[in-house]
Image (cartoon, helix red, strand yellow):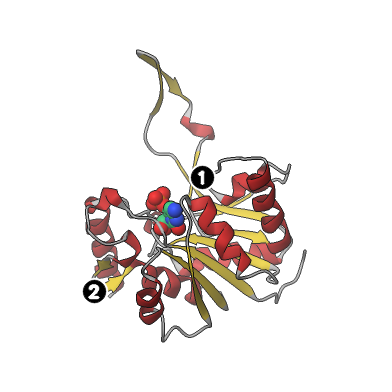
Amino acid sequence: MSNKTAPVAAIVVAAGSGSRLGYPIPKALVEVAGVPLVRRAVDSLVEGGVSRVVVVAPDGHLELCASLLADVAVPVDVVVGGAERQDSVRLGLAAVAEADVVLVHDAARPLVPAHVVADVVERVRGGARAVVPVLPVVDSIRAAAGEGSRVVDRAGLRAVQTPQGFDGALLRDAHAHALAAELVVTDDASACEALGEPVTFVTGHREALKITDPFDLLVAEAILRTRE
Ligand code: C5P
């Protein structure tokens, strides 16, 4: 597909428990500087050019999520998630069945800069069918092997972020295939790759960090202070 003006739908997966964060509520509802992660994630996508959003929410929290997103500038639907991230994406996809350009974003990456979102959109609109934002790996990496370990050359490694952007038909095929083949994937580009589809990189951003533990919340608050 090459369509410079195709509208962009985004699926925001927010149905995880986020137990590592240590809060009694789902991670996506935890606030950073007074605003829940899921709301910040949606706002970042809208600022980057997304025109429709489906939020995949934890069971029992649909109404709360909808109320948190009531005044977003684009149409937002809230649907219930599944047991694994992959299930949640598939459930979200069902709600954007007609979209030609689909982004999939983790609510756990609330501060992705709008220009990264816009880059992903531009590449998909330009004809790339599976686009992922990536960053080089800065740490030395070792692969644990039994009692020992071996160093891995980090030069060729990339850390993968979201939003990932797709040709909508490809993403639907990829998730249908993953389900039928009982393939477990931790991101959506991998599901496309399983169909033989090449993946296109764009440059990610450290501010798109994934909020996983309390330290990440401190970093996110510091980032927001620099944006004031
Ligand atoms: O657990 P982790 O942080 O890797 O999850 C990545 C994203 O996937 C989070 O935004 C989380 O809410 C979402 N997720 C989901 N449904 C699940 C598990 C995770 O929507 N069953």
Foreground residue, 14 or 129? 14
Label 2 CB, ligand 1: below 8 Å?
A: no
Q: Quadrant of the N terminus?
A: bottom right
Circle 1 sits on which residue?
186
What residue do we see at 29% from left, 63% from top? 223
What residue do we see at 56% from left, 77% from top? 52
Q: In the image as oriented, which residue stretches furthest toward the front?
A: 60
Residue 112 appears in which quarter of the rendering? bottom left
Q: Quadrant of ligand 1?
A: bottom left
What residue do we see at 60% from left, 60% from top? 165
The vertical placement of 175 against 60, above or below, is above
Label 1 CB, ligand 1: below 8 Å?
A: yes
Residue 138 appears in which quarter of the rendering? top left
Q: Is residue 205 visible?
A: no
> In the shown orientation, is residue 84 left or right of residue 178?
left
Q: Could you say whether the residue bearing mark 1 is in a helix, strand or loop?
A: loop
Foreground residue, 145 or 131? 145
User: Gap in Å between the C-alphas at discs 1 and 2?
Assistant: 30 Å
Q: Is residue 76 visible?
A: yes
Q: How many marks?
A: 2
Foreground residue, 117 or 93? 93
Nearer to us of marks 1 and 2 is 1
Q: Picture coordinates of residue 64 (x, y %)?
A: 35, 76
Q: Earlier in the sequence, mark 1 or mark 2?
A: 2
**Other residues around mark 1 within 10 Å, as few (<14) / some (14–19) / many (≥20):** few
The kind of residue tagged 1 is: Thr
Q: Picture coordinates of residue 101 (x, y %)?
A: 66, 67
Circle 2 sits on which residue?
34
The vertical placement of 182 against 148, above or below, is below
Q: In the image as oriented, which residue stretches furthest toward the right?
A: 1
